[in-house]
Amino acid sequence: MSEDEACRRIRAARLAYRFPDLLVRIERGELTLSTIALLDDTLTEANYEEVVGAAAGKTKSGVQALLAKRSPAETRHKVQFTASDELRRKLEHAQDLMRHANAVGDLAIVVERAVDLLLEKLEKQRLGKTSRPRPSPEQTDAARISRATRRAVFERDGERCTFTDAEGHRCSATTWLELDHVNPRGRNGTSGAGNLRVRCRAHNLLYAEQTFGKEHVARKIRERLDPRQRRQRGYASESCELAASGLVRMGFRRAEVQRALGTVSAHHGAEELSGMPVETVLHEALAVLT
């Protein structure tokens, strides 16, 4: 298991040694290893029932919010992760370059500024956001979705999956969001805002299966993953195609991805690329893109 996973298990085990009741709550599904690890610095004999009772059934983010409210500063949160040597050097370099605006080198300020820039880029790529928005005309082109239309649909739907079940409960997903055609493109549906909606990947797939049938959708997926199809798309290896798919899903435009993978391919021979793990291809492509 990963180092982080091992740390969570160790912390949970130590806490369960102090409070054996936690094992019962894990078995019931009231708490997870991740949520128990968050309680490590908070639980005492005096507050056990109150804190654990409030945390039961909550997600990791819900427990983090609970603990933040119990601390003197409700808007402050503790964030921990394991960084590589390369990332540590980058953070230290960023601290040095920001001294004029962050004299003490507060790492939280560095990370927040970096995340602001990343969000600006991702929102522009994935949501079509811009500092100078243009009107979003209703389109008749069934294939192309303009940035203005993408922005309008995500804003309209609140950047959340719009699927609603038979009881009227709306899907809570805010990740892996995609634009789905109400009247599918395969049936001459247009790409105007009125024919688009935000769906998470799972519900987008569900609608496709309901519309075209599971066998048809499964066949199309197999065709897309067929190595022969990958080579026809101009990528040098299967790892390059898999990396391309992942980068596009991360929000990079396909043209950018193709150029980056072309650069990676130019630095390696065909034989070397054919045996290169997809993780290595991704790392090198991201270095070009960022």
Image (spheres, rainbow, N blue to C red):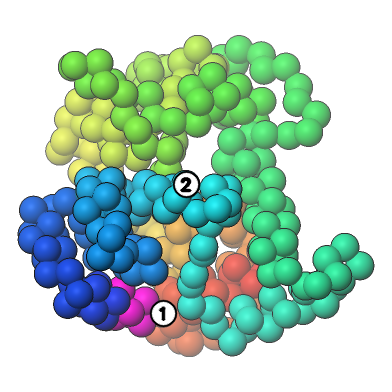
Image quarter in which the N terminus is found: bottom left
Q: Residue at x 31, y 23 (%)?
A: 170
Q: CA distance from mark 1 to mark 2?
A: 44 Å
Q: Nearer the viewer, mark 1 or mark 2?
A: 2
Q: Residue 123: image x %, image y %?
A: 62, 41
Q: Quadrant of the C terminus?
A: bottom right
Most frequent secondary structure within the magenta stretch: helix
User: Does the magenta run of residues contain 98?
Assistant: no
User: Can you tell which quarter of the image residue 257 is in?
Assistant: bottom right
Within 10 Å of the Cα at label 1, are there few (<14), some (14-19), or many (20+) other Cα atoms?
A: few
Q: Position of residue 76 (x, y in %)?
A: 57, 54
Residue type of the residue flagged with mark 1: Pro
Write down the residue under mark 2: 69
Q: Nearer the viewer, residue 176 or 45?
A: 45
Residue 206 seen in the current view: yes
Disc ID at residue 277 = 1
The amino acid type of the residue labelled 2 equals: Lys
Residue at disc 1, secondary structure? loop
Query: Sequence-wise, which precedes: disc 1 or disc 2?
Result: 2
Magenta range is 2-9
- In x, y percent, where is residue 278? 42, 74
Query: Is residue 232 at all visible to an observer of this figure?
Result: no
93 relative position to 227: left or right: right
